[in-house]
Image (cartoon, rainbow, N blue to C red):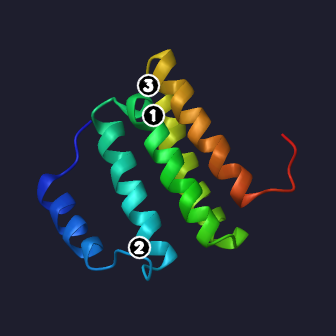
Amino acid sequence: MTLDTDLRKIVTEYLSTKQGDDADFWSVASEIELDEYKWLAAGQLSQHLHKLETVVLKLYQRAKPRRMWASVYDDACLVLGSYAKGSDKKEAAAAERLQTLLRKFAHPDETS
């Protein structure tokens, strides 16, 4: 899997204008997703999982509305689920762990 270099550059440049403490939820979430996709494309999610978890938790401390996290989680289900099916055990476990974290924010009342 590869990411279009030109498109990634355009998105990165756009997101760089929306950084810092004043960045809105969607800008920060998009930046996190872009990193996630980059590492998925390289087959390196497990190597960068801790970093992703850290930035996701930091964003959650700033914004906790379920409806926002539900959108992020829904996207993650599509991408991470497909990735896990075609990956080795280590990468699949990393995808599942990230998806589980996002589910906790989107659906905190669920116990499973």
Q: Amino acid at mark 2?
A: Ser
Give the SS element for disc 1: helix
Give the quadrant of the N terminus. Answer: top left
Q: Amino acid at mark 1?
A: Tyr
> At 39% across and 47% down in the image, what residue appears?
36
In the picture, measured across the screen, residue 14 lies left or right of residue 103, that is: left
Q: Which residue is mark 3?
A: 86
Asked if labels 3 and 2 touch by Cβ distance under 8 angstroms, the answer is: no
Residue mark closest to the camera, 1 vs 2: 2
Give the quadrant of the C terminus. Answer: top right
Q: Residue pushed farthest left?
A: 6
Asked if labels 2 and 1 touch by Cβ distance under 8 angstroms, the answer is: no
The Cα–Cα distance between marks 1 and 2, rounded to whole angstroms, is 23 Å
Viewer-side residue, 93 vs 63: 63
For residue 67, which quarter of the picture? Answer: bottom right
| x then y, percent, for residue 108 | 80, 56
> At 17% across and 68% down in the image, what residue appears?
10
Q: Which residue is mark 1?
A: 83
Q: Which residue is mark 2?
A: 27
Q: Residue pushed farthest bottom?
A: 22
What crowding class fits label 1: few (fewer than 14 Cα within 10 Å), some (14-19), or many (20 or more)? many
Asked if labels 3 and 1 touch by Cβ distance under 8 angstroms, the answer is: yes
What crowding class fits label 3: few (fewer than 14 Cα within 10 Å), some (14-19), or many (20 or more)? few
